[in-house]
Amino acid sequence: MTNTPQPNLDPHKAIGTTGHDWDGIEELNTPLPRWWLWTFYATILWAFAYWVVYPAIPLATSFTKGVFGWTSREQIVKDLDGLKTLRGPMTAKIEAASLQEIENTPELLAFARAQGAAAFAVNCSPCHGAGAQGFKGYPNLNDDDWLWGGSLDAIHTTLQHGIRWDADKDTRTSMMPAFGKDGVLKPNEISTVADYVRSLSGLSTEKGVDLALGQKLFAENCAACHGDAGEGNQDVGAPKLSDKVWLYGADKALIVERITLGGGGQMPAWSQRLDAPTIKSLAVYVHTLGGGQ
C-alpha cells in the first residue's frame, strides 16, 4: 500500500487539489489561464520565425544568414553613409576653410564644435576625460596651461602628428632624462631639486632644505628645458613649474618620482586615423573649451 497523495475537489472553488496536505491546508491545482498559454505558444513560434528570417544561429565558422539577408552591421554602414551624405556640404566647407575662418564664421563654428565634440567623445575622452578635465599624466584641456601650445595651429599640429608617436616622422618629440635612474643626480640632490620645484609655485618645502643648492642643481640640469624660473617651454613640451597646475601631481614624492624616472606620455597621430575635416573640428572644439590661447 502506497502513501501517494490523492487529489480532492475543493468544495469552494470546484477545482481539484494537488493532493498535498500541510496541517489541513491543501494546494489547489489551478490551471494556467488560456490567454497566458496561447501567448507562451506564440512566443515559441515567434522565436522559430526569427531564426528563419534573421541571422541568429552561430555555426563553426559563420552563422545562419536568414532569408531576408539582413545584418545589423550592413545597416550601420548604410546609416553612416547616409550621415556622411547629409553632412557632406558642411564637411566640404570645413575642409576648404582655414582654422581661423572656421572660428570666425558662426555657421562653421557651430558645425565644427558639434562634430568635434562627437569625435572627442569617441577618440579623446578615454585619456582626457569626458569633460576634458584630464587625469594624472593626461593634461586638462580646459585651462590655459599647455605643453605644446594652445593656439589653433599648435593644437591642430599636435592632433595631426601626436606626441612621441614613432609611426609619424613629424611627431612632437622630447624626453625628460631619468636623472635618478641614469645616475645623473644622487637621491639627496633629487630631493633638494624637488623641494626647489615646489617652492617655485609657493608650495611648502622640507624644513632646513638648502633651496640655494636646489636652485643651482635646477639651473644646471633642468633650466635648459623648463626655463631659469620654471616658466616652461612649449617648443619642447616642457611644462611650466611656477604655477599650481601639475600633470603628475604636486606631492614631493610624485615630483621625486618624475625626476628619478623621467620619460613622457604619448598621444596618437590622429591624421593616421581621422580625416582632415574631423581633425580640424577637433582642433576648434578643444580650442574653444576655454583654455585656448
Image (tube, helix red, strand yellow):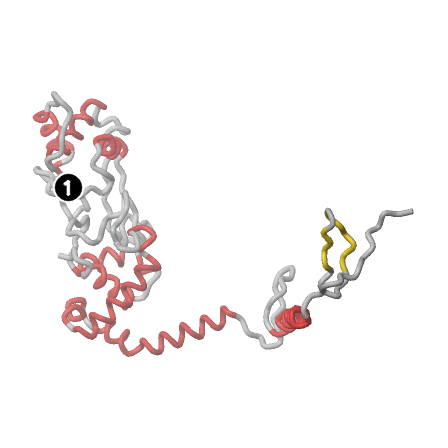
Residue type for callout 1? Lys
**Left or right of residue 31: residue 109:** left
Q: Residue drawn at (25%, 71%), measured in percent from left and top?
A: 111
The residue at 18%/46% (across/down) is 236
Q: Which image quarter: residue 16? A: bottom right
- Whole-percent x, y for residue 257 in the image: 26, 32
User: Which residue bears the numbered disc 1?
Assistant: 244
Residue 242 is situated, as x and y percent measured from the top left of the image, at: 11, 40
**Left or right, residue 172 beside residue 240:** right
Which quadrant, please, contains the C terminus? bottom left
Residue 256 lies, with reference to residue 66, above or below; the image says: above
Give the percent coordinates (x, y) of residue 269.
Answer: 30, 55
Depicted 285 relative to depicted 262: above or below: below
**Residue at the farthest top position:** 208
Question: Which residue lies at the image location 25% right of the left edge and 36% below the top edge?
Answer: 262
- The answer to which image quadrant residue 56 occupies is bottom right
Task: Say left or right for 242 vs 267.
Answer: left
**SS at mark 1 in the image:** loop
